Image (spheres, rainbow, N blue to C red):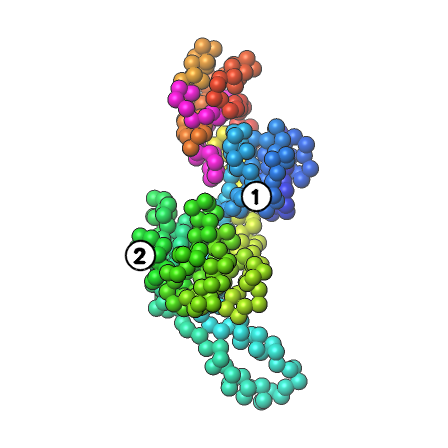
């Protein structure tokens, strides 16, 4: 029986992925095998000795102590792309809000007295509507910074609206490149994108290389009158730099899902309360994806969408499986296999992958290794942890 401790409210559809025969799931479990959470700020003290994995039902993992988990050989999973459509649709709304005087027009109408005669109201609206005239998106240039699961959808959205779409991603993967339509023009650097785009939409994770990507220096390159959209992470944008760009007229609008006290009350800023992924469908998709990833790891040792471990999936042969995590140093796998051979244990199948300083091995063996063999493996210098996974039963 595997035990899952949850933090936050997890979608029922996600929780239903854990069968009652093999899993106990609750918010209060003393010795959990895994942790499933959303936005809870997870402290190291909450990750007990029994925890083998942590899964975040969402893309961002800045609420999880990644380094501490890696040091203990605990993979941390996230759910990239599960909420991509929800964010894309909110970006669509933001593009329309940026290009037309929709917010101002609604505010004006709501300021009118309900006692005003219909004819008088009609005449007033006809007279004042020119104040809220805007521009069409068709023919404008949309610059997408970050072309992953969400950014690629936003790029397609722009093309569907008749916009010219340009993109920049310094770490574009082959998989992400395949998702992009051929009509998207890739820019060589951020400055080139800023100089051409009427609308700029940010879709990047928070890394040291992306923190304050929009800053006092880079913001000087905005095309005059551009609109900046940030539905990624607040740390990517330096608020002071945005204020300076707005005051100088380099930016016409800033629309973001991450309010800041300095931005409240400005007519050239539209703030939303971090609702990009707040749809019922997105929460369900994230929860189901996170649950499936935990199951694949706990039941089979397979790793999908880990932010700190290499991706690795090995088809089960039906027997016992060893999952060995070790420091990524030469000779480790040879030491492990030597111990198994010395104990007369036949290896049926195996797979090895590494990522940065961590290596991960799945080794299918004939028969169950004894506790003594497991202790020998665990005692090898450089081995972080060893897990014996029983034949499939869930």
| Tag shown at residue 185 | 2
Q: Which residues are magenta?
A: 303-332
Q: Residue 34, image x and y in percent?
A: 59, 34
* Residue 283 visible in rendering: yes
Local crowd size for mark 1, using a 10 Å CA cut-off: few (<14), some (14–19), many (≥20): some
The quarter in which the C terminus is drawn is top right
Q: Are marks 1 and 2 in contact (CB under 8 Å)?
A: no
Front-lying residue, 169 or 173:
169
- Left or right of 34: which side holds 137? left
Q: Check the image and report above or below for 194 versus 344.
A: below
The quarter in which the N terminus is drawn is top right
Q: Check the image and report above or below for 366 versus 301.
A: above
Measured Cα–Cα span from mark 1 to mark 2: 34 Å
Local crowd size for mark 2, using a 10 Å CA cut-off: few (<14), some (14–19), many (≥20): some
Q: Residue 267, image x and y in percent?
A: 53, 70
Please give the residue where the numbered disc 1 appears in the rendered image: 63
Q: Check the image and report above or below for 28 versus 272.
A: above
């Amino acid at each position: 029986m595997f035990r899952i401790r949850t933090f936050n409210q997890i979608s029922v559809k996600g929780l239903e992925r854990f069968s009652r025969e093999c899993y106990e799931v609750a918010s209060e479990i003393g010795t959990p095998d895994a942790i499933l959470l959303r936005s809870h700020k997870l402290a190291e003290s909450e990750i007990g000795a029994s925890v083998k994995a942590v899964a975040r039902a969402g893309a961002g993992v800045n609420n999880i102590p990644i380094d501490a988990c890696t040091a203990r050989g605990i993979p941390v999973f996230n759910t990239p792309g599960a909420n991509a459509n929800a964010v894309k649709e909110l970006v669509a709304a933001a593009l329309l809000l940026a290009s037309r005087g929709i917010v101002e027009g609604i505010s004006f109408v709501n300021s009118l007295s309900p006692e005003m005669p219909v004819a008088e109201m009609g005449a007033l609206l006809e007279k004042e509507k020119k104040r809220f005239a805007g521009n069409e998106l068709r023919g404008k240039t949309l610059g997408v910074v970050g072309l992953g699961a969400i950014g690629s959808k936003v790029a397609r959205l722009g093309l569907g609206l008749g916009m010219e779409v340009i993109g920049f991603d310094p770490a574009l993967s082959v998989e992400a490149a395949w998702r992009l339509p051929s009509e998207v023009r890739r820019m060589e650097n951020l400055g080139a994108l800023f100089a051409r785009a009427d609308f700029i939409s940010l879709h990047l994770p928070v890394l040291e290389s992306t923190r304050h990507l929009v800053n006092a220096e880079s913001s000087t390159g905005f095309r005059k009158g551009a609109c900046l959209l940030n539905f990624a992470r607040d740390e990517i944008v330096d608020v002071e730099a945005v204020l300076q760009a707005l005051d100088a007229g380099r930016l016409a609008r800033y629309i973001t899902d991450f309010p800041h006290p300095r931005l409240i009350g400005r007519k050239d800023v539209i703030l939303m309360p971090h609702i990009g992924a707040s749809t019922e469908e997105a929460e369900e998709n994230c929860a189901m994806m996170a649950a499936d990833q935990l199951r694949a790891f706990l039941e089979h040792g397979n790793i999908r969408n880990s932010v700190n471990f290499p991706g690795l999936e090995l088809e089960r042969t039906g027997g016992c499986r060893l999952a060995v995590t070790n420091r990524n140093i030469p000779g480790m796998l040879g030491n492990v296999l030597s111990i198994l051979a010395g104990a007369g244990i036949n290896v049926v199948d195996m797979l090895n992958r590494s990522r940065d300083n961590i290596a991960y091995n799945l080794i299918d063996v004939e028969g169950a290794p004894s506790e003594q063999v497991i202790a020998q493996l665990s005692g090898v210098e450089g081995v972080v942890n060893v897990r014996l996974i029983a034949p499939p039963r869930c």
